[in-house]
Amino acid sequence: MRLDKIRVLARREFLVRVKSKGFWFGILVLPLFLGAVFVIPTLVLSKTKAQLDLVMVDATGRLGDGVAERLGRSREGMGPGAEVALTVVAPEADREEQRRRLDDRLLGEEIDAWLWIDDEALASGEVEYHARNVSNTFTLEILERALSAEVRELRLTEAGYDPQQVASLIEEVELQTIRVSAEGSRREAGEAGFLFAYALFFMLYMVLLIWGQQVLQGVLEEKTSRVVEVIASAARPFDLMMGKLLGIGAAAFTQFSVWMVTLATVTAPAVVGSLAFLPEGLTIPRITVVQVAAVLLFFVLGFFVYSTMFAAVGAAFNNLQEAQQLAFVPTASIILPIFFLLPVINDPASPLAVGLSMVPLLSPILMPLRVAVEMPPLWQIALSALLTGAFIVLMVWVCGRIYRTGILMYGKKPTVRELWRWVRHA
Amino acid sequence: MTTPALELIGLRKAFGDFVAVDDVSLAVPAGTVFGLLGPNGAGKTTTIRMIMDIIAPDAGEVLLAGRPRRREDLERVGYLPEERGLYRRMTVGDHLAFLGELHGLAHREAVARAGRWLERLGLADRAQRKVEELSKGLQQKVQIAGTLIHEPQLVILDEPFSGLDPINQVLFKDLLAEYRQEGRTILFSTHVMEQAEKLCDSIGLISQGRAVLVGELAEIKRREGSNSYRLVADGPLDRTAGVAGVAEVVVDPRSGDRARLFLAPDADPAAVLRALVGFLAVRDFRSEEPALEEIFVKAVRDAA
């Protein structure tokens, strides 16, 4: 092994990738996506007209004030700056004429919408909403909720019930999910924790697969372009393989750490607090530095576990079509953890989950998953990393032998038995 | 005699039952051009790959400057394999610098030399272009520069002229001439005898894995040429082999009326001619240095 050669080779691999547009697209896609989800709605909402001018024609004469009060109370829920200015008026003698005038004011952009509550509204539960734009569902829902609550209260009162009492009688149960961790308990939406674990799983799965394929294609490119023989005279095949793995691995690590740091930043309490737009009831789980470090560590381990196999497969065959058949082995190894996804997320500290996260082919994905749901004891992380590291040494040895023989071998497609012979006799 | 730049001792390599290289020994004197000759499939590439430690010999030894070859020595060799290529998506400048660094140059030095080479090849304005954007001929130029960028003392080229366009052939020949002037050693393989005849100081003829004739080209020609005659005649040329005093006949398969006659050392050329006119309409019979190709055919036959 010649470190100077590996360094030159790795730097080439890294630079070639970092200089490509695809790399930067990949690196920016997650931050852009998160930006699109969190920041743009906030911006859009704050840009929309600060005040919504509503005129409510209340023929019942009993709803207007209550609704106005309720709207005032739920103002915080309407996003930054969105306020409803509600003017309650009584119906005039000529109702048709009144409607026409309201429409005119609407078209003249004097008001943004008008509501028509006729005499039967309490019974029928129907209220008209006239506006230039009827797709602002968010505002509509708040209006609807305020109206419904008011109508419900009036109906109950008329039927002889005390609305306060009824409300407390029919109150629903709300499950308070409390995540217990060594850093102290904190309330958190369980749903969000799962969401994050799922997201992390698919991210790891995708990124490991994509970069593994990069290794496969990189090795094949060297073979098909015949550049490998020029290189092989100056560097041993083993150094060539290590240079490739380290170089591509560095590019993959760069991309993935940007993603993880973005995630950790976006979910930091300070950032989350400043985000105005969040689906109701969703708390974003906080991602700690230790978690990020653990996930990154297993990402690196995973890259080497799977990509070493991809490198050997690439070296053994002459073109991508031939190689895809055996590329199934590393690909399947990356997919394998999906079968254990649910049990691990549901009970990340169960003996099954702990055991599986120690198995080298599974650990690179299952251990980060456990970390995401519930921080495991450090000794388990260390043991898993150690076992995976040992497995990588074995893989590098086995795959290095296949690589060494295959990389300069052209012609017939080798059989699995021949590959095994390369491992034994190389 | 000075130590040869490169020496092969009893090199052997078999692939299964097929013996590709069989007990090949030869020495390449320092500062000379050595041609490794033979038809396709003779074992030239396998020999070169063993020199470059790309495949391990079953037996034998490779000496560089009199010492057993170590892996580190090879990075000071300029090697152009028969199967060659470049990273298509790298820029030309980066690629050359990369090859320089891989052969032990410091980064800055490699970049500087890459610039000088591109200047020399007239490619300076294309340094930032990707290799795949270059024409095939220009890619060949880059390949040649990549082989020589670390200024090797020993250059090993496997069929260097095959696939090169005529302009690059001339360029390459000029570069090699320049290298030889500077006292560097060049070994190249070819199956084109005329090429070797023009460029080489020494040759090694390989046939079916065996070195059948090794030595200085001028010396070989002198030795083989003293009794060599050119015959142009109509009639059954193959019967000339039976004539007394004729040791060897190489009939030119292309013309059908020409042959190279190698006479026995003590033969009388006049007596041979008299015998020939008995059954041939001889138009030309004269003493002439044989072409390398004819020597090669004879050597293969002698070895068999």
Image (cartoon, helix red, strand yellow):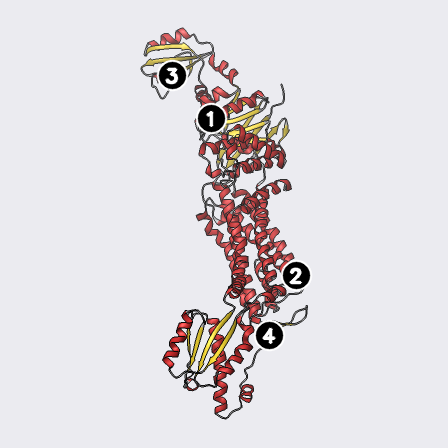
Q: Are marks 4 and 1 in contact (CB under 8 Å)?
A: no
Residue B228 percent location from the top left of the image: 44, 13
In the image, residue A143 sits, relative to residue A386, either above or below, namely below
Residue B301 in view (yes/no): no
Disc 4 and disc 2 on one polypeptide chain: yes
A171 to A16, vertically: above or below: below
Q: Is residue B155 above or below residue B258?
A: below
Chain ID, mark 3 = B
Question: Can you tell which of label 4 and label 1 is closer to the viewer?
Answer: 4
Q: Mark 4, residues whose alpha carbon is within 10 Å: few (<14), some, or many (≥20)?
A: few
Cα–Cα gap, marks 4 and 2: 23 Å
| Residue where numbered disc 1 is placed | B169
Which residue is at the front of the view, A297 or B196? A297
Judging by the rendered image, the residue that carries numbered circle 2 is A290
Mark 3, mark 1: which one is toward the viewer?
1
Residue kind at label 1, given as amino acid type: Gln
Q: Which residue is mark 3?
A: B259
